Amino acid sequence: MGRYAPPPPPGVSPPPQWGDPNIVRERLGSAVRDLTFTRDTMLFPTLSPQHYRLNMAENFGPAKKLFETYGIHFDPALRDEVVNRVDRLRLPSYTGFVMPKLEPVQGPDGTIADIRISYPCDLTTQMLEYSEATSGWHHNT
């Protein structure tokens, strides 16, 4: 889907960093005291996958931009690509934000011979791992 989305505005850091306590403290600086963080699971209760899509199209900025760009000028090939990919995965409908985890598989000579793809359904763990992996990406804004 990323290839269809416009780039983020200049100076905007990846959303998973917004939950990194160190980055939040750095950005808030001395403007805030007694800052606490509570980790929990983020659920997206919806009535159906279609309800979830409608909610995202109306309320989530990046998804809204995609729907504004491609929704009016309906692209059946893009729709079919997304539907086919999701159907093959057989994931529960609540995994809308779970990203695939890519792990290199080394061949006998030590080079990467393949990529193992999995879909961990623990969004909190995935966002924490992503935040740690991208901690050097933040911008001083």
Image (cartoon, rainbow, N blue to C red):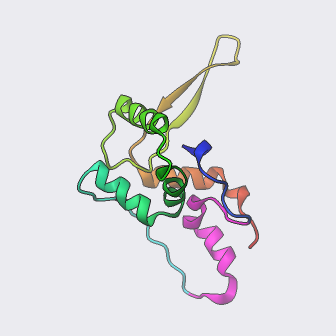
Please state the extent of the stretch shown in magenta in the rendering: 11-33
Instruction: Tell me the quadrant of the picture where the C terminus can be found.
Output: bottom right
- At 44% from the left and 46% from the top, the residue drawn is 98
Which one is in front, 14 or 29?
Answer: 14
Let me know if residue 42 appears in the view. Answer: no
Residue 114: x %, y % from top left: 59, 20
In the image, is 74 to the left or to the right of 104?
Answer: left
Is 104 within the magenta?
no
Residue at far top of view: 108
- At 72% from the left and 57% from the top, the residue drawn is 137
Residue at far right of view: 140
In the image, is 123 to the left or to the right of 61?
Answer: left
Residue 42: x %, y % from top left: 38, 60
Residue 112: x %, y % from top left: 67, 21
- At 64% from the left and 53% from the top, the residue drawn is 6
Let me know if residue 75 appears in the view. Answer: yes
